[in-house]
Amino acid sequence: MLFQPINKNYHEFHIDRDKDLCINCQVCVRQCSYEAHYWDKARNKVMHDSSKCIGCHRCEALCPTAALHIRKKPSDFRGNASWRPVFIENIYKQADTGGVLLAGMGSPVDIPIYWDRMLLDASQVTNPSIDPLREPMELDTYLGAKPSRIEVTQGTDGKPKLKTRTTPQLKLKYPILFSAMSFGSINFNLHRAMARAATELGTYYNTGEGGLHKSLYKYGANTIVQVASGRFGVHKDYLQAGAGIEIKVGQGAKPGIGGHLPGEKINDKVSETRMVPIGSDAISPAPHHDIYSIEDLLQLIFALKEASEYKAPVSVKIAAVHNVAAIASGVVRAGADIVAIDGMRGGTGAAPAMTRDNVGIPIELALASVDQRLRDEGIRNQASIIAGGGIRCSADVIKAIALGADAVYMGTGTLIAVGCTLCGRCYTGKCPWGIATNDPKLSRRQNPDIAAKKMVNLVRAWGHEIEEMLGGMGLNSIESLRGNRDKLRAVGLSDTEMDILGVKHAGR
Ligand code: SF4
Ligand code: SF4
């Protein structure tokens, strides 16, 4: 019988400390929220316990003498193609605890990433390319239902005037929005940073399912307020505070299941915003208990439109699953102005690892099939599409738009911009980078001004790159690329994959 957990010594990471460089300053001791470093009084020097390290790299990044190196320490089990170490270690953990394996962030499993299997076109002799440094490029994006035809009349000034009444639109300066991340799952400093960044950029951030703190109402013109199954923080003022409203039906990282914010993360501010008691778990159920059909969804969509006095477009967020195209069609017919599709590589604060890694489909396939289905049914103009869950760079954005998206949600990228190293321990509430935590000491590691600046820089940088690539294709507006799959070519994909994506193979 073993008296310690079997996996005690099979830990994932190893801390290397260069004894010649370490000056015993104890920065690592203060920075590690997992107490992997400690001051050894007897030896009068800093020591460490590698078994406690979760691989966040905070100590390595902040060590003033670069004395630390965090490396993977996979145990060398006997090679077995079926029983890979991850399965063995998971079984050890579950045999010790009897619990569900939890995980944070997006799935690390090796499912094909189709963005990497699609290449963009560029102009050469005919249809010459455009230099974005010398000619204006248009990235402006409007999200919302578009009329099937428009009527124009002449205004009193003699200029053409739109006669057709359009439904409310979200106007974006970049085709990129900050994804839904609830206050509670991330802390107030970062919510404030996202609100400021979205305002400065002329785009939107999404409250996620945790409500909106009163002090952030002033950023409402750049806020999408979310309504999820738990209805946390949802009330009339909240619904009227945002420029758009999103009903969250599903999430790419955990389709088919609800959410769970542990009581430890519910401090006074989160409690006030979510309208739940301090310290109590906030559990959102898997389904909305008032939605069991498309007709029920229609009722909620119109109830929310009415609550906003028909000023805010309503988005419905669905997870990318097998029949996502049929679901999206129903969502659009139910009156949604925007369909947000979240792919299986999307991030999350907490999800059962098995669900995160085995449920859902990649965003690329989901996006292409939804766009095609809406076109085939002649209802594509009735709603915009936002694609999220696996957008890593500006090339992914531009490929998503060529596949049919109007804009993308960026979640994980936003957090990486402020230091996240994808350690996947968001559910513990001890995020060493001060992101997925409400611990006052850890939250202070994020300065809202600096975080907002980094987010703004990232989106601006991607914007420049998008303009470069558009210009290279001979296009001067993002609108000309929407759904233009002829600008994409596949490499190494099967006929079925290319058929679903609606792209030809490179060389054709
Ligand atoms: S958990 Fe993070 S801060 Fe702590 S030892 Fe590991 S890498 Fe360093
Ligand atoms: S948010 Fe924090 S806890 Fe979550 S993956 Fe990033 S660094 Fe780790």
Image: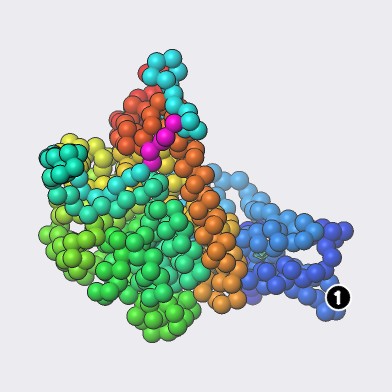
| Residue drawn at 38 percent across, 32 percent down | 476
Residue 43 sits above or below residue 336 on the image: below
Q: Quadrant of ligand 1?
A: bottom right
Quadrant including the C terminus = top left
Local secondary structure at mark 1: loop
Identify which amino acid the numbered label 1 is placed on.
Asn
| Residue drawn at 33 percent across, 45 percent down | 141
**For the residue with label 1, is its CB less than 8 Å from the closest atom of ligand 1?**
no
Residue at numbered disc 1: 44
Residue 504 in sight from this viewpoint: yes
Q: Is residue 182 left or right of residue 317?
A: right
Query: Which residues, given as a range, are shown in magenta?
Result: 135-139
Magenta includes 344?
no
x and y, in percent, of residue 452 in the image: 51, 60
Q: Quadrant of residue 259?
A: bottom left
Magenta includes 136?
yes
Q: Nearer the viewer, residue 274 or 321?
A: 274
Q: Is residue 378 left or right of residue 319?
A: left
Question: Of all residues shown, which one is farthest toward the top?
Answer: 125
Q: Nearer the viewer, residue 421 or 408?
A: 408
| Residue drawn at 36 percent across, 49 percent down | 172
Residue 490 sits above or below residue 287 on the image: above
x and y, in percent, of residue 77 in the image: 63, 52
Magenta residues: mostly which secondary structure?
loop
